[in-house]
Image (cartoon, rainbow, N blue to C red):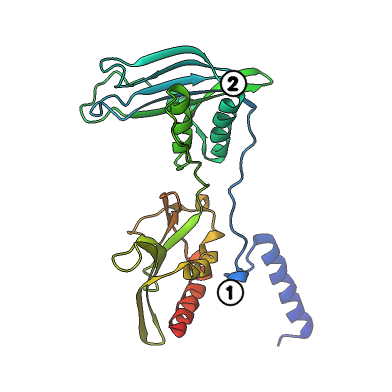
Amino acid sequence: MLTARKILGVILIMSLFTSLFGCTAKKTPQYTTAEDFPPAYEKPVPELPGKLVGVTHESSAGSMEFATEFAIDVAPEQILHCEYWDLNVKRDEMICKDNVPITEQQWADVEKAVLDLWGSWEEIPEEILNQPDDTEYFVLDGGDYDRWWLSWETEDGVQKVRYYAPADRRILTLDAVLEELAHPTGRKIEWAEPPVLSGATYINDTTDMSFQCNWWNLPEGPKEGYRLIVRFEEGGENISIYDQTDDAVWNAAKPAFAWLNPDDFEHGSYKDKIMLSLYYSDGTQKSLKIDKKTAAAIEPYLRQLTLEYLGQK
């Protein structure tokens, strides 16, 4: 027969075992209101390696696109070298310029366009840069390239670093600034806004639920707007929605997705049991393979939001 002392001893032993081996069961959080979700995730911006003192860019649309090559090497006070096509002047060769002075404002525009993208620049690893160069091969239907170097003034001197082209619409602003610098034509520079989360598609085959809300070119009514596509079963009833709607629905749904850090998840596809696609205002998209714990945290809110939407119609 278990005495009170023996029962207490068993409880103490179980508590000690749990603390030592981390066996405390953690409840999956379930968010039922927009305010329950953690704050929207903001990707940390790395510290600048130094003062920006140079930008080098080379690009081409490929061998099948005539006269698209462009190159520039610019410093704070001058264009060191640039090459571009101006078919109104020369149709058989590129125009080259060296040591062209620029103004403080022109360099300020270059610097702003580069630093606006700072969180999106990714340095190319040395092992990639040290691979054999295959640029000598002629590709009939390709050969396009987009190469970037940024030069930084550091404590160890000037460092010239090679970067991947950012997957961010603001790179088009930098392109335009550099092209206008090399070949002034009075271009209107469009300073693109930072991309923001503008839609999502959530699919969970294990619960037979899908929820999609994103900006779309609508077949009827306004040319653009939000669409809401939802499917799941609730209380034995099949819930199905395919609606044109406004941004109020997305603003209500957004907290369910905005707190997630895409880097915490593997790349996903429609073959995954649980998948989430995040859409951004610059046209980019991230597909994520979502774990069951994350799905259990956000799905109840999406179901409730859908039922509230139906109740208001």
Label number found at residue 261: none
Q: From this view, report whether residue 101 is shown above or below residue 170.
A: above
Q: From this view, report whether residue 267 is shown above or below residue 66.
A: below
Circle 1: residue type = Thr
**In screen coordinates, is 118 left or right of 183?**
right
**Residue at 58% across / 48% down in the picture?**
43
Q: Which residue is mark 1?
A: 33
Q: Where is residue 275, by image quadrant?
A: bottom left
Expressed as whole percent of the image width and height from the top left, the position of residue 78 reads 55, 17
Expressed as whole percent of the image width and height from the top left, the position of residue 279 reads 43, 55
Expressed as whole percent of the image width and height from the top left, the position of residue 183 reads 42, 23
Mark 1 in CB contact with mark 2 (< 8 angstroms): no
Mark in front: 1 vs 2 = 2
Q: Is residue 170 visible?
A: yes
Circle 2: residue type = Pro
Say which quadrant the N terminus sits in.
Answer: bottom right
Q: Nearer the viewer, residue 223 or 228?
A: 223
Q: Earlier in the sequence, mark 1 or mark 2?
A: 1
Expressed as whole percent of the image width and height from the top left, the position of residue 207 reads 40, 73
Q: Nearer the viewer, residue 235 or 45?
A: 45
Q: Which residue is mark 2?
A: 76
**Residue at 49% across / 76% down in the picture?**
305
Say which quadrant the C terminus sits in.
Answer: bottom left
Q: Which secondary structure lies at badge 1?
A: loop
Q: Residue furthest top?
A: 98
